[in-house]
Amino acid sequence: MLKRTSIIIYFKNPKILKEIEKISTIMYYNKKRKYAIIYVNESDVEENMNKISKMKSVKKVEQSLVENEEYILDFDVK
């Protein structure tokens, strides 16, 4: 099974979503707060982040902390 990771994209104009959709499927977007979340293969993360960050209407691109090993959520209820 392929490992996938999420990328958070902050944009200026929602029209950029059409271009982002060509790279990967958009799982969630919020036009009011101007961000989108996509999932990509772990091996292609850096390549896709570079492609997206070079687009005109993109403010910021970052990898989600949820899958990061340094950021672990522990929900064990006792």
Image (cartoon, helix red, strand yellow):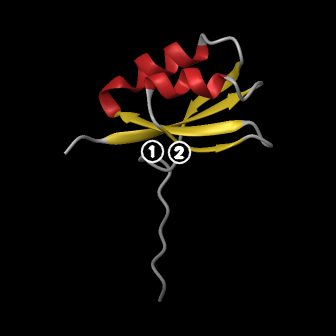
Q: Position of residue 55 (x, y in %)?
A: 62, 12
Q: Residue furthest right?
A: 32
Mark 2 Cα shell of 10 Å, populated few (<14), some (14-19), many (≥20)? some
Residue type at the position of mark 1: Asn
Report if the CB atoms under discs 2 and 1 are less than 8 Å apart.
yes
Q: Residue furthest bottom?
A: 78
Near-viewer residue (70 or 33): 33
Q: Amino acid at mark 2?
A: Leu
Q: Quadrant of residue 48?
A: top left
Quadrant position of the N terminus in the picture = top left
Residue at x-position 80% and y-position 43%: 32
Q: Residue at x 41, y 47 (%)?
A: 69
Count of numbered marks: 2
Residue corresponding to mark 2:
65
Residue 65 in picture, x, y percent from top left: 53, 45
Mark 1 Cα shell of 10 Å, populated few (<14), some (14-19), many (≥20): few
Most foreground residue, 43 or 17: 17
Task: Locate residue 36, reporting x and y percent.
Answer: 62, 38
Figure check: 58 above or below 25: above
**Dot 1 corresponds to which residue?**
68
Q: Secondary structure at mark 2?
A: loop
The residue drawn where x is 47% and y is 57% is: 72
The quarter holding residue 42 reads top left
Seen from the viewer's position, the closer of residues 73 and 27 is: 27
CA distance separating discs 2 and 1: 5 Å
In the rendered view, does 35 fall on the left or right side of 70? right
State the image quarter where residue 60 is shown. top right
Q: Spot the residue most to the left.
A: 1
SS category of the residue bearing label 1: loop
What mark, if any, has residue 56 been given in the picture?
none
Task: Give the image location of residue 28, x and y in percent.
Answer: 58, 46
